[in-house]
Image: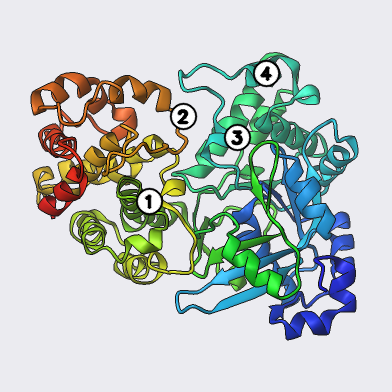
Amino acid sequence: MLTLTQECLVNNRKEWEEAGYALPQYDRIEMARETARNPKWIHFGAGNIFRAFQANLMQKLLNDGDEKAGLVAVDGFDFEIILKNYRPHDNLSILVTLKADGSIEKTVIGSIGASLIMDREYAEDFRILESMFRNPSLQMVSFTITEKGYSLTDAKGETLPAVKSDFLKGPAQASSYIGKVSSLLYERYLNGQLPVSMVSMDNCSHNGDKLFAAVDAYAKAWVENGLAEEGFLAYIEDPKKVAFPWTMIDKITPRPDASVEKLLEKDGLDLTPAETSRHTFIAPFVNAEESEYLVVEDLFPNGRPALEKAGVYFTDRETVNKVERMKVCTCLNPLHTSLAVFGCLLGYQKISDEMKDEDLVKLVNTIGYKEGLPVVTDPGILSPKEFIDTVVKVRIPNPFMPDTPQRIATDTSQKLAIRFGETIKAYQASDELDVNDLKLIPLVQAAWIRYLMKLDDELNPMELSSDPLLEELEEYSCTLKIGEETEETLRNKLEGLLRNKKIFGIDLIEAGLDKLVINYLCRMTAGKGAVRKTLQEAL
């Protein structure tokens, strides 16, 4: 019987290897000691994407002898991730890579040198964190805490109570997430204004700016309120001291799947997933696709790990921006959102199954190649055409990836502006392209409004994925009735929504796309099967 612990890994190494696991090729005990002595890389957000991607990158460097210290995994939101997932397994986890050809790779990830909780109630953990931030060896602090993690305001634009409280209490008593991160940076400032790079690796546009804006807000408030030295603000705002590079990250990492759990059980491993009290789905293993991309602005005032040896692209800010726009605005994210919305309406439970649907394949091919690709700027380091080819021919159709349209439909109101609005803007700005030639992007926008009615195409009740604007959107969707709408009634009911630039990125009425969106929506609300029929007619 194998157990995911350091002792079992050492004592039963042959059994692990015979079961097909790639194991750490370095001394984990010495790695942990070096991590404590000379930490180089701290990561906030100890979830699935981190264990599948960043932790595996560091494992490659450790295996090859390019690094001696491991990663420090920190969670400041859901402490049970550390307490119930990391520490019982000696900071080990299993990465199951699901390949499109049906094969899998099983890797024991051992690159986590320490796991910590960022909370003052866990006094020893917080003391260690402060000590690490004071250490001259620290080079980079990275984040996968989701875009919402950087927000200091609520949906109404009002400062969150915890943030407002921290502004008045100062770094020594900060309790909000970014407040605590900022207080750790203040420790680094007080210990000689030591340089460091703060690297957001979250999947959002200009992520470095979002992290900077959040930290900068705390620094300004604390300095203005006399709670921090004046030099702290200058320190945060000096990229030669504290850098906030942009990044583009791309790797599909669904939540741990039951089918993967069964594969591991056959090897004698008991790795039962669980749900934390904060509703985080955790397991000692993570399943992920093989494809992965990480493009990073090379802005590291204190040096950095040699991650280019593990496949990371280091480049300038302009190139990161081009790659990010290529992916988010055209080559992946819009296709994913299209499949998510239609997948929910048409009753699909797996994204890969949607790629067996001729209508949906034609939908994403047209949006990607025909409507999106003409306005993509080639970043040079990655080919947009080849990127889309991989997405539609390898990544999304991968039958072994247990990803769902319901997961991808999460927070769609926050995604439409970037994933489709930017393409519309590019058409508007072009002398050669006509915005009225866009036929299927408006179809997805209409389908999303139809999705908000909480009824699938068979008119069965449908649960919506979480979204911060659901309550606000309910004011529109609750007025819509199947079989009763005309284009005129829809226009009257939805004018405010169609003009919402925050959601769509542009005013659909000003752009002249409202007529087509309303026409599609009217047809989609005609009755049972109307979504499929409208999709086919639009194609």
Read off the residue under disc 4: 167
Disc 3 residue type (three-letter): Glu
| Label 2 CA crowd tier, 10 Å (few <14, some 14–19, many 20+) | some
At a point 68% along the width and 54% down the height, the residue shown is 273
Read off the residue under disc 2: 468
The colour scheme applied to this rendered structure is: rainbow
Disc 1 residue type (three-letter): Val
For the residues labelled 3 and 4, the Cα–Cα distance comes to 18 Å
In this view, the mark in front (1 or 4): 1
User: x, y (%) of residue 264?
Assistant: 68, 70
Q: Earlier in the sequence, mark 4 or mark 2?
A: 4
**Left or right of 138: which side holds 479?**
left
Q: Quadrant of the C terminus?
A: bottom left
Read off the residue under disc 3: 237
For the residues labelled 1 and 2, the Cα–Cα distance comes to 20 Å
Disc 2 residue type (three-letter): Pro
| Label 3 CA crowd tier, 10 Å (few <14, some 14–19, many 20+) | some
In this view, the mark in front (3 or 4): 4
Question: Between 247 and 437, which is closer to the camera in this rendering?
Answer: 437
**Left or right of 172: which side holds 160?**
left
The image shows residue 361, relative to residue 60, as above or below, that is: above
Disc 4 residue type (three-letter): Phe
User: x, y (%) of residue 493?
Assistant: 20, 20
Marks 3 and 4 in Cβ contact (< 8 Å) = no
Q: Earlier in the sequence, mark 1 or mark 3?
A: 3
Read off the residue under disc 1: 328
| Label 1 CA crowd tier, 10 Å (few <14, some 14–19, many 20+) | many
